[in-house]
Amino acid sequence: MSLTNTPQPELHALYNQHHGWLQGWLRGKLGNNSDAADIAQDTFMRILVARNAAVIQQPREYLATIARGLVTDRFRRLAIERAYLDTLATRPEPETVSPETRAIILETLFAIDRMLDQMGARAREIFMLAQFEGLTYSEISERLGISITTVKKHLVRALTQCLLLSAE
Amino acid sequence: MSTIVSSEGRLSPDILEAAARWYVHLQENSHEDERAAWRHWLNADVRHRQAWAQLESLEQRLLSVPGDIVRPTIFGARAQRRRVTTVLTLLMGTGLISTLIYQNVPWQQLQATYRTRTGETRRVQLADGGTVDINTASAVDIDYQSTHRIVRLYRGEILIRTGGDPFNRPFEVHTQHGSVRALGTYFNVRTSAQQTRVSVLEHAVELRPLHGEVRRLEAGQQADYGNGAMSDATNVDPNLIAWHAGKLIAIDQRLGEFIQELARYRKGYLACDPAVADLRISGAFRLFDTDAILANLTASLPVKVVFVTRYWARIEPR
């Protein structure tokens, strides 16, 4: 991530005035000081990168909104990581995965999970079948009892949503 | 993927959708005239080419993890999430409203049972931010109600990191031999038919055995209690929670004890001939492959492993 060289005085002010409050608020929510410190830091990183400190109207509300999203992300990551380890554990052959590869796999799984969230239940099901089970459109149409045209329509929408999300 | 965004800014959803439509269409129709039409679309506008490039890098990313990993992981994670979402939403709400809802949650629904198989460990994230790590062959109930937080350990071993509770409900671990009340802390509990051993890693706990008196245990201390009197507090073995990192650590340990410990992590029968039980062993062993540990023993000690079946093994003099 390339960070800015130009100073952001508003960000400094924001940080000085609200960092302590934010971390305290998070500690109250999470009951854990080191997680609270991490997430408070990540929250300000977001603002640093977005370079929008100057236009924030209601700082605490805004900070809390970002922080809440980050906490949710963290729980999701934990769920993905746990499920990934469970998946590996059920494989017949033990696999050795380097820490780097593992980090990339987890990041990808996390991104896929977020993409699936953008989809309706039907689109998600079709997308999973086409993308990760390798079913053809006609196999999906048979399995779900819908027309091939409907399968394609859902897939187009699902892919478009994935593209919009990755462009964010 | 940000490299693809042009100087003209983000691509419009319409263009992305057109690219997706071509992509879906071409997957199963590769007639030459279709492809010609697609190339015509690509050449018509630089943004079409950008959208197509984004789509290709998305596909590449989606295909980078095998489908048979993606499917179970995603399903597993989403199932886990459904279980914790209620609690999470409540924790992350704001102010008074959340407090009111929080208190009216039917806590009975937040009971859960966890079991691990032999050789398996798992982590359970608690609603208050704490964690329970469950060691091999264990059975645990987590029971959070409006008045208390109780973890019931029926069998095996757990490592607890308590979370701060907005309602200051007491946190306890119950075993068949009594209860342990956490005083804001990190501790390990192991139970067998005969006794429960509590080892405190940070802060302190209060032991409340069924038989005997309440006693406070400080960081670095451990004690055993069962049907008889409670043992004196002794120092916690620094390698106690190596299991948490998937390791078994022995420092000049009797082979007999080592094998007994290893047997907890291995399916079937594993025993040590008394003739070699007093040999000494040191090392850090990776628990995920107990066969390799046994092979390692035969290389470093004058012993052999007699396998009757894959699940019946005995260490004997060589």
Image (cartoon, coloured by chain):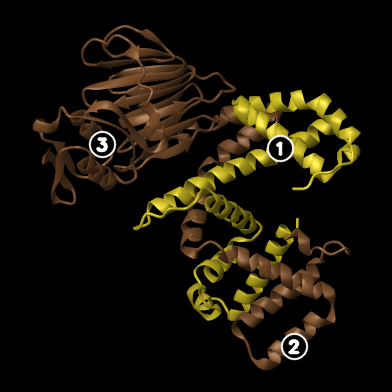
Chain colours: A yellow, B brown
Name the image quarter holding the C terminus of chain B: top left
Q: What's the chain of the residue with tag 3?
A: B
Q: Is residue A90 above or below residue B176?
A: below
Question: Are tags 1 and 2 found on a single chain?
Answer: no
Say which chain tag 2 marks.
B
Which residue is more in the foreground, A45 or B214? Answer: A45
**Residue at left 28%, top 46%?**
B292
In the displayed structure, B18 sits above or below B201; it is below
Q: Earlier in the sequence, mark 3 or mark 2?
A: 2
In which image quadrant can residue B94 be found?
top right
Q: CA distance from mark 3 to mark 1?
A: 42 Å
> In this view of the protein, can residue A159 be seen by the observer?
yes
Letter of the chain that mark 1 sits on in the rendering: A
Picture coordinates of residue B146, whole percent (x, y): 51, 25
Residue A71: x %, y % from top left: 64, 38
Disc 1 from disc 2: Cα separation: 47 Å
- Do the residues at discs 3 and 2 belong to one chain? yes
Amino acid type, residue under disc 2 in the picture = Ala
Please identify, in this view, whether the residue under mark 3 or under mark 2 is nearer the observer.
3
Residue that mark 3 sits on: B262
Describe the element under mark 1 as helix, strand or loop.
Answer: helix
Rendered location of residue B249, percent (x, y): 33, 31
Which residue is drawn at the image coordinates 23% and 46% (left, top)? B295
Q: To which residue does mark 2 refer?
A: B37
Contact check, label 1 and label 2, Cβ < 8 Å: no
Amino acid type of the residue tagged 1 in the rendering: Asp
Which residue has dot 1 on it?
A42
For disc 2, the neighbor class at 10 Å (few under 14, some 14 to 19, many from 20) is few
Amino acid type of disc 3?
Answer: Leu
